[in-house]
Each structure stands twice: as structure tokens, then as C-alpha cells.
Amino acid sequence: MVFSSHLFIFYFLPAALALYAASRRWLPKPTQHLGLLIASYFFYGWANPAFVILMLFSTSVDYLCGLVIDRAEHDPGRRKAAVTVSVLVNLGLLAFFKYFNFGIDTWNATFATLGLEGLRAESVLRITLPLGISFYTFQSMSYTIDVYRGRCRALRNPIDFAAYVAMFPQLVAGPIIRFQEVADQLQERRHTLAKSARGVAFFSLGLAKKVLLANPCGKVADLAFESHALGVLEAWLGVFAYAFQIYFDFSGYSDMAIGLGLILGFRFPKNFDSPYRSASITEFWRRWHMSLSRWLRDYLYIPLGGNRRGRARTYVNLMLVMLLGGLWHGAAWTFVVWGAIHGSLLAVERLHRDHTGRPTLPGPRPVRIAATFLVVLISWVFFRAPDLGRAVAYLADMVGWGNNPETALVAGMMLAPYYLTCLSLAAVITWCAPQTWDFTERLTPAKAVLTLMLFATSVVMMETQGYNPFIYFIF
């Protein structure tokens, strides 16, 4: 069930909000999140009810481990054992469900290349990837780690903890909400008309980003990456379209999640801060998928030593974090290469800063923004391509070295006025328009009318669009 569907907007959401309001009004405080929990499990189990069982298992392990850590205040060994169990269970589930197929395929491909067919691993087991497992395992695991570090106390109420893990607004694609960010809100929060109005505006603008911009840009990107006969112009247009698709798709989802959170009384952290206006890759990762960047920093980069163990180790840590970050996004070598590109550039920028004392490369900011966006575009080729061979071939098309002649049919479809208009509008909004976070901070009557018009237009367009994927659902 996706947010940009009539099923969600007109059926599930009203029922979920009614159930939430009824449980808060009629049930005692320890069970006030029961309605939210039921709605969230229903939302998550819509695609496959078995996924709920997996989430219940992960939630139970982390809830119990948190209690053990909290109660064993003077028993370091027991505390360490509990947090270790939590981390191993979460990473084990993630590794099995996300990387089992990848591991088998890589093993077989390696020995097939070496001519050692007899060493192939025969497996009839093919694992289905549960929706959002990368997000909720990181979120749940951060809870036990923070309890172990003394940053928060364990949550005694199992309903509240389960609702925190399964909360449907950000369950399958983030933002990754750390427990300390909502711990107090789970106990007490205010529901106000102003907060709900801002939530509706957030949701409406996020829906418009998704339906009116991401979907048409995605059609252009698919035409480009699925074609093996591209000219230079069409290849560049395709990667531009994908850059806009993934940005408006994911930031649109984050906006809708933040908006739904506000309607439920929660304040979730910002997840995007105009990343394509960055003047360096370092700045880009402070602005793109900010909840993941903070998670990788606090739970991977700093434990690895961060920048405290010398310059060489700092560069290695940056590279390692981004390699693992790439692999977190998907079980394919293309994601590893994507992570390696970003990790290498982060290390180079850090090296430049260490040797010159200047935080950024020289040059006017507009030039640096353009250069950074160019690098991001090239890296998106690996993120989008189905395999390394197709990624290399696509890059060859971008510089005119492709082996296949371009076809007028593909070019004509990609250069249709409707798609060019959507791409142009996406570019204007990317570099010139205010962010949703800032736009909704103070709602005026004019802004309210605009957001409602965009909502209505998006709902009408949903009726005509057969193409409506959420990219980050597969991660």
C-alpha cells in the first residue's frame, strides 16, 4: 500500500486516524497507542502478512534486550551480552533476507568465471525481501544501543515500543527515527490545529512531489535506462530525469511521513535539505537522507574511530562507511560502486581540508554546486543501472561512445512536451523553490489554497497514472 493511492488516502488513512483517536480517547493511557499499532501492522501486512511476524520477532528481541540492559545497571557483562544479542539478531535478519540471494549469485558467478562449475552452490531457496526491513532494523537496533550507552532509559510499555518500531508513516522508507528523538513524545504530546494543518500541508506537498514530478520523471528515466540505443542527449536527459525522480520520490515520501506524523502529534526530524544545492559531496551528505547520514555517523563512523585515530584511518573510515552505506541500499555490486564513488570523494575532500585548511574546493559557489551535481549524476548511473555492464554502457552513451545506434522512437518519447515540461519544472523547484519544511512553517491563506489545489490535482492525476512506484520501498 503506497501513500500515493486512493486506497491509502480515502480508505486506510481515515480508518487509521479514527482508530487512533478512539484508542486515545477511550482506552487507558498504557494502551493509548494500541490503535496506532493495529493500524501500522495492518498497513505493513497488506503486501504480505508474514512480514508482520518477522517484525514482531525483531521488536520482541529488542524490547527484551532493552529491559535487560536497563536493569543490569551494575553488571557490565550482562549489559554487553544483551546489546550484542540485539545487534546480531538485527544484522542477522537483515543479512539473511537482503543478501542471501546476492551471496549465492555472486558465489556462482565467481566460480563460473573461473571455470569451476563444480563449486557452484545449488540452492532452491530464493528469499523475498520484506518491505522496509533496512529501515526498521536500523531504527529498532539504535534503541538498544542508545539504552546501552545511557542516552535513554528502556521503555517499559511493550505497546508503546511496538508502536515506535511499526509506526506506519515512516515504517517502510524512513526517515529513520531514533528512539531518543520521540521518547518524550511517546509519553506525552500535544495535538493542535496548527500542527495538524501543517501536517496536511506537508502531506499535500509531498504527494504533489511524488505524483506530479517524480512519476513522470521516472517514466523518462525508465525509457533511457531500459533502452540500448541512446544518443548523447537522451542519455543525459535520462540521468537528469532519474536524479529528479529519486529526489522528488524520496523527499516526497519523507514529506508525507512528516506530515502524517504531525497529524498524529509527532514531530519527526527533517530528512532532506535541498541536497542538489550542495557545493561538495561532504555537504551533499549533510543534506541528503539526513536521518541515514546521522545513523551511519553515530553508529558506524564514530565506533570505527571517526577522525580520532589519525588522518589515514579517517580516510579509510569514510570509505568503509560509504561502501557499507551503498550495500545497505541494495544487494548488488552497482550499489557498492556507488558507495565507493561517494566514499572516495568524501576522503579526497577531507584530505584537501587537512592539507589546505579550507573546508571546500576553490571556486565560486555556483560552479562548485554544478560540479557536485555532475558527480552525483554520474554516481546515480550505478545506482539506477541493473548491473555493472549496463552502467558502463550507459556512461559510454553519455559521452557518445555507445555501440548501438540511437533510435528516433526512444528520442521522440523522451522529448515529448509533457515530459520536458515536468523536467523543467522539477529543475526550477530543485534550485529555486523554498523547501517544504520552510514553506509550511507559517501557513497563510494563500499557501493553504495552493496546497489544497496541489492535493486535488495530485488525486486527479493518480487516476490517470499507471506508473506509481516508490523507489525506496525496495531498500
Image (spheres, rainbow, N blue to C red):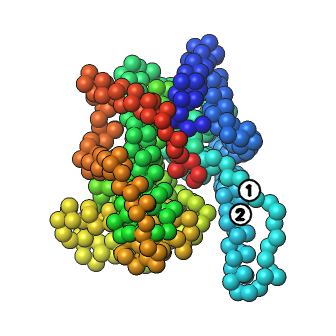
Judged left or right of residue 445, residue 345 is right
Placement of 61 over or under 357, stated as above or below: above
What residue is shown at x 48% (from left), y 56% (from top)?
222
Mark 2: which amino acid?
Asn
What residue is shown at x 44% (from left), y 57% (from top)?
221
Judged left or right of residue 155, residue 367 is left
Numbered tag placed on residue 101 in the rendering: 2
Q: CB atoms at circles 1 and 2 under 8 Å apart?
A: yes
Judged left or right of residue 178, residue 23 is right
The residue labelled by disc 1 is 127
Judged left or right of residue 121, residue 239 is left
What residue is shown at x 30% (from left), y 58% (from top)?
278
Callout 1 crowding tier (Cα within 10 Å): few <14, some 14–19, many ≥20: few
- In percent of width and height, residue 20 lies at 58, 21
Numbered tag placed on residue 9 in the rendering: none
Mark 1: which amino acid?
Ile
- In percent of width and height, residue 117 lies at 78, 82
Cα–Cα span, label 1 and label 2? 6 Å
